[in-house]
Image (cartoon, helix red, strand yellow):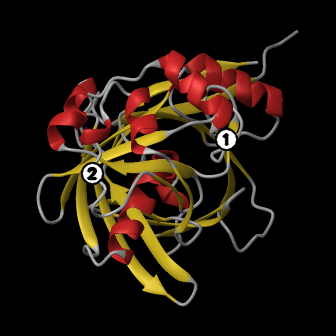
Amino acid sequence: MTARRFRFVTVDVFTETRFGGNPLAVFPDARGISDAEMQALAAEFNLSETTFVLPPDDPANTARVRIFNRKAEMPFAGHPNVGTGFVLADRARDGLLRFEEIAGLVHVRVEEGGTTIEAPQPLSTGATMDAATLASCVGLSAADVLPDRHGPVLASCGNSFVVAEVTPEALGRAAPDLARFRAVARDWTAAGPERLPLYLWAREGRDALRARMFSPLSGTIEDPATGSAATPLAALLHSLGEGDRFTLRQGVEMGRPSTLRLAAWRVEDGVRASVGGSCVRVLEGEALL
């Protein structure tokens, strides 16, 4: 039987330097790829996420974009949208792309200085987590978690994370304990079954932030850049009167430094946020199915 061929592109997202940032695989035309094949391809690429572009349900929109991590489909994610917007820039109308996703419609602005996406939902917060419990998952102590602005809390702008501020020194030495993640996830299920993404952040200045994200139960031991976690962080800080524009660094400890540009603003339905940055093409090829 003749193999079916599907073109893919990989890009490094939130960086201007090849082999930095967060790598992403994009299938610009995924028509004919089954759900099971999409999941298998995402596992084969073994990246944080892989995206599959399909015709939109509404012709007023640009595309329907499906996002898979190594183990499951995701309702929304940051760097996959930024990278997919970069790859599909030639489809933009007046610099704007509109992606249909499970979490809602994602607006993508493609400009010479980078690609920016608006998260599909306003900030929502949910369950809190005890500081000692969170700290135990990443080899820290409860004293390393800073409670003054907010305690560890589940926050989302379309994809949920447990967001916690820690000291800058603690951020650098955090290390995930897989057994502890599994034990905590059995009882703390607010983020979903077998899902416990922890997003730790620290101040580097008034508008300068640094972060790390650990989600080993989803197959991502550590992520070089997590736009869908950075957006609720920006929205949360804005809701606390901490500013409206931020520059965030991530991936430093992994040797894949990433720079994310964040903005947050209040509108009628709540606090909204965007994340943007640069991208670099790395690979092009075909997958055989």
Residues packed near mark 2 inside 10 Å, few (<14), some (14 to 19) or many (20 plus): some
Give above or below for 143 relative to 182: below
Q: Quadrant of the C terminus?
A: top right
Instruction: Please give the label number shown on residue 260.
Output: none
**Residue 11 seen in this snapshot:** no
| Residue type indicated by callout 2 | Leu
Q: Residue 143: x, y in percent? A: 25, 40
Circle 2 SS class: loop
Q: Is residue 23 left or right of residue 45?
A: left
**Residue 90 seen in this snapshot:** yes
Q: Earlier in the sequence, mark 1 or mark 2?
A: 2
What is the CA distance from the residue labelled 1 to the residue labelled 2?
Answer: 23 Å
Mark 1 sits on what residue? Answer: 189
Q: Nearer the viewer, residue 15 or 177?
A: 177
Give above or below for 180 relative to 124: above
Q: Residue 96: x, y in percent? A: 50, 71
Q: Residue furthest top?
A: 1
Q: Nearer the viewer, residue 168 or 147?
A: 147
Q: Is residue 235 left or right of residue 51?
A: left
Give above or below for 277 relative to 281: below
Who's the residue at 17% across and 42% down the image? 168
Circle 1 SS class: loop
Residues packed near mark 1 inside 10 Å, few (<14), some (14 to 19) or many (20 plus): few
Q: Quadrant of the N terminus?
A: top right
Q: Residue furthest right?
A: 1
Who's the residue at 11% across and 59% down the image? 205
Q: Residue 266: x, y in percent? A: 43, 84
| Residue type indicated by callout 1 | Thr
Q: Nearer the viewer, residue 277 or 244?
A: 244
Instruction: Please give the label number shown on residue 146.
Output: 2
Q: Residue 215: x, y in percent? A: 50, 32
